[in-house]
Each structure stands twice: as structure tokens, then as C-alpha cells.
Amino acid sequence: MTHSGTRKFTRALTALTVAALGSALLTACGDSAGGSGDTVTIGIGGNIFDIPFQVAEAQGFFTQQGVKVKYVTLTASTGASALESGSVQFLNDSPTGFLSALGKHIPETAIAVDGGGNPLGLVVSTKFASAHGLTAASPAAQVAQALAGSTGGASSANTKAEAGLFLKAHGVDPTKLKWVSLPSPAADKTALKSDQIDWFVTSEPTPLDIQHSGDGIVVADPVKVPAWSAAEAGYGELLVARTSYLSEHADVAKKVATAVQQATAYLNANLDSEAVQAAAQKALAGVPADVVKASLHQVDWPKSGAMSTADWDKTLKFINSLGALPQPAAVTADNWTNKYLS
């Protein structure tokens, strides 16, 4: 090889080495800045609203957008802090969680809606159902009256308040009931089986899973309780990011929001398909297939992730009716945007 050829080869090798090192560093750091092959971390809740992300993975929507996604399961109490610390770039959050953060002046912005309504189930123990003649088909009024004087379990202020909406709608004062505070839906389930409580309310698939196992009966859902439905309650889950992150990484936000919107639209059009069932089964690992299928129908999966003032007004009305936040929630046009959706 000539001296000139050696110099050319060395320059080419150096360029390749720099490129390789740069790629390695980006991978090691989990880089989430702009460019192709962006890697982001999304905080999820370990519930039915995780399904759009599994659908987006299975259908290649994230890949098509040039995004690699990692997930961290968070709770209502850890989601906002994880987002603000930057340990996650996006958070799949409930409207209550989002509005609570805004109430604390935490600068977050909602960029898409990925589920509507509250997929709740009120499950009573089989012993209580037998004693009060309740079945899954019992009218809502009969169920509410049977709960008067009973012992309910509550693992969050939200679900307790949502149960209260149902009871009050049928003339039952929730303050007259006995309540047992429990740390989680799993603890609710244990308390139900041990007869410590007669019933509790939580999001699917837990109630239907309990019914499937024969330990309880789901006697109220969004069909029987219109106040829990998307038509009356508004948004059920939102894709949220730090406002500062969005200003610095608008391209990445657009990719993620677009992929999630494609997933919810796919869910809307193919809810009972094998592809959706498989993705849902992966999101809800260990839950029986028939329970997963029934739970999917408890959520209003939107064709578009776009939000509106009218739907935000509906959502605010519902959340403020719960009284679960320390002060009435409020939202302005600065707190949400549709500009990251295709």
C-alpha cells in the first residue's frame, strides 16, 4: 500500500472508530435526545392502561418512528418524582395524578390521551353475594342498597370516592359504611378472601380476576355506573412529559406520541383480534385470557390521542366531584397540547 493510501486508510479507520465510540456512548447513556434510534424510558402503572405500549411494540409502531422504549413500573406516589428527576422521560399517568402534580406547581404537560373512562369493578365476596342475593346481573340500585351497612375496602382515596359516587346515586350514604384502609388492590383481594371486608372497588383486571377464581362477584362496572364511563368521566389515562423536556426534545416527543396514538387506534379497530389479545396478555402477565379480553372492553380506546377543552371540562368535573385532591383541580391550555400528534 502506498504512503498516500495508508493515510487514507488511517483516516477512514479513525472516522469509523469515532462513530463506533459515539454510538456506544449513546447506548450506554440511554440517550433520549433527537436523532434516529432514540431510546426513552416510560413510566407505566402495571395495569390495563399499559396495553397500548405492548401493542405499539408488537405492531412495530415504535420501531417505525425510530424509537427504542424501556419501561419502569411506578405507583401514583412515585410517578411525578420519577418524571421530574429525569429517570423517565414520559409517564403514563391518570388525570388525577397529573392534576395533582399541577396543583403542586410541577411543570408537566399532557401530550396525548391513551384511554378513556374508569375501568372499575366493584367486587363483593361470594359470601356477601349469597347472603344478599346478588349476582353479576343484579340491578345497580339493588347492589347499592345491599352495601348499606357493609364493610368496604379502600386502597386509594380515588377508588373510595368513586365507590361513593355510585352509592350516593342510589341513596346510600358512604359515610355510614365501615371502611378498612388497605395499601394496595392486592391487599384488598386478600382482605376480601379472609372476610375482613365485604367488597372493594379497583381497576380491572383485578375484580374480574377475582370473579374468575371464584372468590367474588363483580356487581358493578362502567356500564352499570355511568359516572365511571368515558362519556361522563372523560379521560382515563394520559401520556405526560416534563415541559422542559418537550422544549428540548420535541422530535422525540412527536415520535412517542405518534406511536402511542397508532396503538390506541389499532386497539379501537381490532379489540378482539389475536394480535391485540396477545399484546394484552403480555401487558397483564398471569391474568387469565378471558379476564384480559373482558377487561379490554372496559376502556374507551381512542382513535385519536388528541385532547379538547370540552373533554378536559368533563374530566375536571368528574375529578372535582370525587373530592380526592386537597383543592379543586384546574387546567389551562398551557398544561396540555396536541402539537406532538401526527
Image (tube, helix red, strand yellow):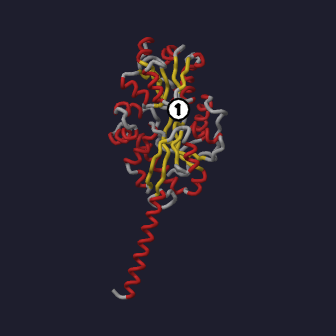
Q: Is residue 227 visible?
A: no
Q: Quadrant of the N terminus?
A: bottom left
Decide if residue 42 is on the left or right side of residue 208. right
The total number of labels drawn is: 1
Judge whether 252 appears above or below 294 on screen. Answer: below
Q: Is residue 191 visible?
A: yes
| Residue at (56% x, 23% y) in the render | 164
| Residue on which the image places disc 1 | 231
- Dot 1 lies on which element? helix
Residue 205 location (% of width, % of height): 42, 31
Q: Nearer the viewer, residue 135 or 139?
A: 135
Mark 1 surroundings: few (<14), some (14-19) or many (≥20) residues within 10 A: some
Residue 319 location (% of width, % of height): 59, 32
Q: Nearer the viewer, residue 248 or 153?
A: 153
Judge whether 315 appears above or below 109 on screen. Answer: above
For badge 1, the amino acid type reads Ala
Q: Nearer the viewer, residue 74 or 221?
A: 74
Judge whether 257 appears above or below 312 on screen. Answer: below
| Residue at (45% x, 41% y) in the render | 50
The answer to which image quadrant residue 171 occupies is top right
Residue 220 location (% of width, % of height): 47, 23
Residue 179 location (% of width, % of height): 55, 20
| Residue at (47% x, 57% y) in the render | 38
